[in-house]
Structures are given as C-alpha cells and as structure tokens.
Image (tube, rainbow, N blue to C red):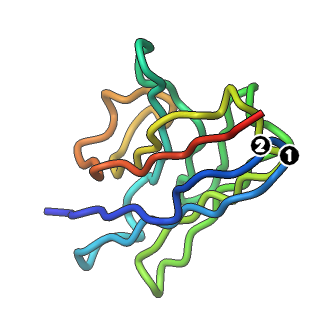
Amino acid sequence: QVQLVESGGGLVQAGGSLRLSCAASGRTFSSYTMGWFRQAPGKEREFVAAHTWTTLYYADSVKGRFTISRDNAKNTVYLQMNSLKPEDTAVYYCAAGSGAALSPRSYGYWGQGTQVTVSS
C-alpha cells in the first residue's frame, strides 16, 4: 500500500516557476515508477512526466520546461516547472505504479492532486 501527498501548487504568473512535491509512504518507494499527470477543467487526465528506475519521460508539451526527479531516501518525487504557461493550468496528480510509464492505467496509487494556476 502506498499513500501519496502532493504539495507546492499555487498561483503564478506566466513565465514563472513552481516546484511540486509528492511524499510517499511505504518501504518500497524506490521500486515504483513515479509519474505526474494533470487534468484541466473539461479535459481528460494527461501524462506530464515519469521517472522509472532508469529512464525519464516527458510529454512533448512540457519537454525542456519541466524536470522530474526523485529522492528515494526521502520517498519523494518532485516536478520542477519553469517557464509556466496559462495552458499549464490544471490539477496535478502524483502517481505510483509499474509498467508503461505514460499510461494512467499503469498506476495503481494516486494522490489527491494540487492545483496549479498560471495567469497571463
């Protein structure tokens, strides 16, 4: 069983930065693929970034602006978001799972989400 708690969301102007954190419970954190997804109003949940044991993945829309990292000693995964755009506005979710890193169906554990709002 894994519990995930996100933090770090908020309101920021376009061009600004935010860092999201996701703290996980459980002793097997390092064995999970950790992912970030987001969902904007009226839209489906979409993949943002993932961190497996060996590989990082990014959605094309955030590549070069967002960075995912993890600290297995702290059971925490981060999402550094730079050069934010109004279209990045969404609820951001942290997830833990295994398998295909880009598919929400690979993730069995989800956090409650944190709101990110980017003003123009």
Q: Is residue 81 left or right of residue 7?
A: right
Picture coordinates of residue 77, whole percent (x, y): 51, 66
Q: Amino acid at mark 2?
A: Leu
- Residue corresponding to mark 1: 15
Tell me the number on the disc at residue 84: 2
Q: Residue at x 67, y 40 (%)?
A: 118
Q: Nearer the viewer, residue 98 or 79?
A: 79
Q: Residue at x 56, y 69 (%)?
A: 70
Counting other residues with Cα less than 10 Å from the Cα at mark 2, is it few (<14), some (14-19), or many (20 or more)?
A: many
Q: Is residue 108 left or right of residue 55?
A: left
Q: Residue at x 59, y 34 (%)?
A: 89
Q: Amino acid at mark 1?
A: Gly
Q: Which quarter of the image is occupied by the C terminus?
A: top right
Comes first in the chain, label 1 or label 2: 1
Tell me the number on the disc at residue 93: none
- Determine whether 23 is above or below 56 in the image: below
Picture coordinates of residue 56, whole percent (x, y): 66, 49
Q: Are marks 1 and 2 in contact (CB under 8 Å)?
A: yes
